[in-house]
Amino acid sequence: MSFFITGLLVGIVSLIPGISGGTIILLRNQYEEISQIISHYQKNKKQIFYLISGVIIGAILFAKVVELLFQYLPTETIMLFFGFLLFSTPQLIHKEKKNINLLGLIIGALIVFLIFLNIPASEPIITNYPQLTISFLILFALSGCLDGFITILPGISGSMVLMLLGPYYLYKSYLANLSLSNISFLIPLTIYFISDLIGIFIGSKLSIYFLQKHHNLSISIIIGFVVASLIILIPFSAFNNLNTILTSIISLIISYITIEFINFFTNKSTT
């Protein structure tokens, strides 16, 4: 049941740009355990089943909520996600403060900024879906693989990277409007989930290796990702009236309370 709950949380945060699924696993003190389970999946099929089931259920149940938030409160939603990242970062830094080096921070921040500078803007609400061509499905599968790879890494959000690259809103809209009668949605989502699992498997292998062999540099790069992401997520141009500013502050308060709530129950369940 513990793996199902962790999977459920990871599935929910997989739709929230700013919170890393790997960070949630790390905060639940299950990171190395789950990475090892994924790496040796043939011996741990039961645990893998519970984990994957939780991820899928969490993502499907929460997708419509995220869709509605972007539709009616786009700026406030971005600020909510910004707050999730902002208020979860200190705990990660506190745990690793002795292992942080400047070079890793700079490398991590530069990677995120370079990605951001080369990304075209995307609409948060998708109404026209692309045709299911071979080239589109291959690119969408690669997006899923990248999402899974990044999701398992603590500190950087896979959905945030997808938001910067573009496919995030399409993936979210597919999930939010999922229907068993609509095969045009089932095909890309199935391909995406399979690719996502492949990415998680590869990411767990690499993250264990680098965190064991090059821990300080790896952690520093991850924190560099987070710091740069904080700067990029702020929608400066949207703060054009007092009402938006006040509602954005409310969003930050909600995100703070949510992170504290998650931290409380995470710490309680692991003591």
Image: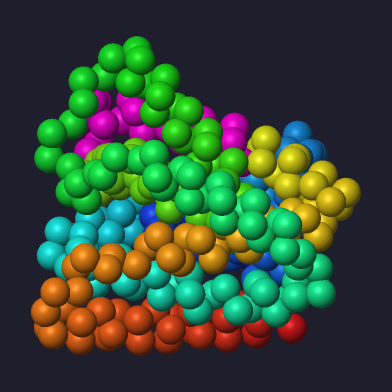
Front position in the image: 41 or 35 = 35
Q: Which residues are magenta?
A: 179-200
Compared to 250, does 228 lie above or below?
A: above
Q: In the visual, does 242 lie left or right of 157?
A: left
Q: Residue 95: x, y in percent?
A: 74, 76
Look at 88% across and 49% down and name the residue there.
Answer: 213
Is 114 a magenta residue?
A: no
Look at 45% across and 27% down and name the residue there.
Answer: 141
Looking at the rendering, which quadrant does residue 225 occupy? bottom right
Is 195 a magenta residue?
A: yes
What secondary structure do most residues of the magenta stretch adopt?
helix
Q: Residue 27: x, y in percent?
A: 65, 71
Q: Report the residue that reaches farthest toward the top.
A: 134
Compared to 201, does 224 lie above or below?
A: below
Q: Is residue 51 visible?
A: no
Look at 74% across and 83% down and name the residue there.
Answer: 271
Front position in the image: 88 or 184 = 88
| Quadrant holding the N terminus | bottom right
